Amino acid sequence: MLPAASRLTDSADFRSVTKRGRRAGRPRLVVHAVTAGTRDAQPEADPRASRTPATPRVGFVVSKAVGNSVVRHRVARRLRHVAADRLGTLPPGSALVVRALPMAAEASSAELGRDFDAAIRRLGLLGGGRGGDDRATDDRGTGGGG
C-alpha cells in the first residue's frame, strides 16, 4: 500500500509535475518527475511551495484509453504496488506522475515494474542515469534515444 504521505492527490500538483517536470516514456507507461532542489521544482508563485515533503510522492493517471473501469483499477493497483516497493530508492522531496498507456492493460506486474524502473533510471532517479537503449523523450518530448 502506498502511504498517504507518499500520494500525490492535488490536481495542481499533477499539473505542476507534468508541465515543469522531465519525462521518460516506456511502452506501457510515461513517468513525469520533479526532483526537490532542481530548477524544475521551483514554483512560480505557489504558496504551498514552502512545504517540501521529505518523502517522495507519486500520483497515477490511468485514462479510459487503457480499458474499462475493471482494467483501469487493476492497472492502477499494480502501479501503486510497484511504486510503493521503490519509494525508498527515490530522492526525498521528489514528485512523480505515472501515466499508464493502453499497453499497460495487458501487462503483468513484473512488466510494469521493469518499465517503471527503466523510466526512473532514465530520469536519473535510480542508479544508471541517462543512456542505453531507453527510448525516452527529453523535457518537451522532442527527442529520444534509439
Image: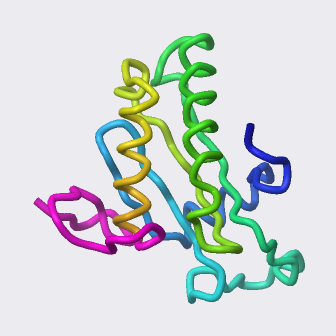
The image shows residue 83 at horizontal and vertical percentages of 59, 47
Q: Main secondary structure of the magenta part?
A: loop
User: Which of the 4 image quadrants contains residue 122?
Assistant: bottom left
**Nearer to us in this view, 46 or 56:** 56
In x, y percent, where is residue 29?
Answer: 41, 42
Between 50 and 108, the residue placed more toward the observer is 108
Which x, y percent locates residue 94?
Answer: 64, 70
**Residue visible at 15% across and 59% down in the picture:** 133
Relative horizontal placement of residue 93, taking residue 137 as reference (left or right)? right
Instruction: Please provide the residue range marked out in magenta.
Output: 124-146
Q: Quadrant of the C terminus?
A: bottom left
- 62 left or right of 26 in image: right
**Residue 46, picture quadrant:** bottom right
> Is 139 a magenta residue?
yes
- Residue at left 57%, top 53%? 86
Horizontal side, residue 19 vs residue 57: left or right: left
| Residue 100 within the segment the image draws in magenta | no
The residue under the point 64% across, 88% down is 37
